[in-house]
Amino acid sequence: GAVVSQHPSRVICKSGTSVKIECRSLDFQATTMFWYRQFPKQSLMLMATSNEGSKATYEQGVEKDKFLINHASLTLSTLTVTSAHPEDSSFYICSARMTGAGKYGYTFGSGTRLTVV
Amino acid sequence: EDKVVQSPLSLVVHEGDTVTLNCSYEVTNFRSLLWYKQEKKAPTFLFMLTSSGIEKKSGRLSSILDKKELFSILNITATQTGDSAVYLCAVEAGGYQKVTFGTGTKLQVIP
């Protein structure tokens, strides 16, 4: 139980285009989803907290207009990288807090490797 | 600003050795401390600790939290090559359930 499905797992796009990444909670309702970015050999850096039905909360230094987050339902949150540039190439991963009896911690999506060429 | 610091940054051991990974933190409104194992993609959950002094165990892995000294350790006994991974410590704090990750400890277990 408590599975988060993330798509796509890998995407290559041209500079200037936009890319949408989806995270779905498959067997639970995720009122809050967290979006992280991970550079090679570095830890996960929180980009924003996505709340169902309201605006996302962005961390300092993260451009709201560049990384658009939508959390339209209790099971779906999306991150759109707009006008992507090579420096946006990274590993993006979402997570949600597990809820329910016997469930602890956070569950992660499988991540999206974005390469901007 | 919340901080989570892990040590060592990397570690190479032989199969059968016991390792101890450290995590210290400075956060406002601590809620829980989490340990994850990350191999190639998404981190996999290991432990969630909320109370001091209570050891959590899962097979050869165990972890304990000291809320007075603000640190946690993750022990792995009788290490195997399959234990090779990056081990991440994270702390959940504040009202928004914000999770801050440490830099990770890269563990390599050689035969």
Image (cartoon, rainbow, N blue to C red):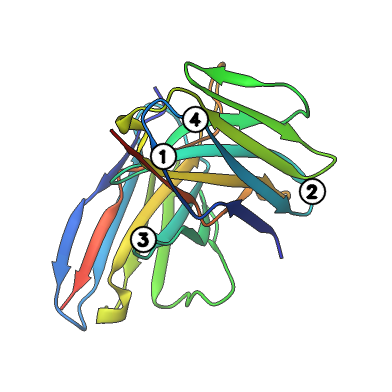
> Which structural element holds mark 2?
loop
> Label 3 is found on which chain of the structure?
A
Report, in whole angstroms, how far the alpha carbon at label 2 lies from the one at label 3.
28 Å
> Which structural element holds mark 1?
strand
Residues tagged 2 and 1 counted as in contact (Cβ below 8 A): no
Question: Which of A26 and B33 lies nearest the eye of the viewer?
Answer: B33
Label drawn at residue A79: 3
Mark 2 or 4: in front is 4
Quadrant into which the C terminus of chain B falls: top left
Q: Which residue is mark 2?
A: B29
* Mark 2 on the same chain as mark 1: yes
Q: Quadrant of residue B66?
A: top right
Look at label 2 and name its amino acid.
Asn
Residues tagged 2 and 3 counted as in contact (Cβ below 8 A): no
Mark 2 or 3: in front is 2
Report, in whole angstroms, how far the alpha carbon at label 2 lies from the one at label 1.
36 Å
Q: Is residue B59 left or right of residue A111?
A: right
| Image coords of residue B102 (percent x, y) | 56, 54
Label drawn at residue B13: 1
> Which structural element holds mark 4?
strand
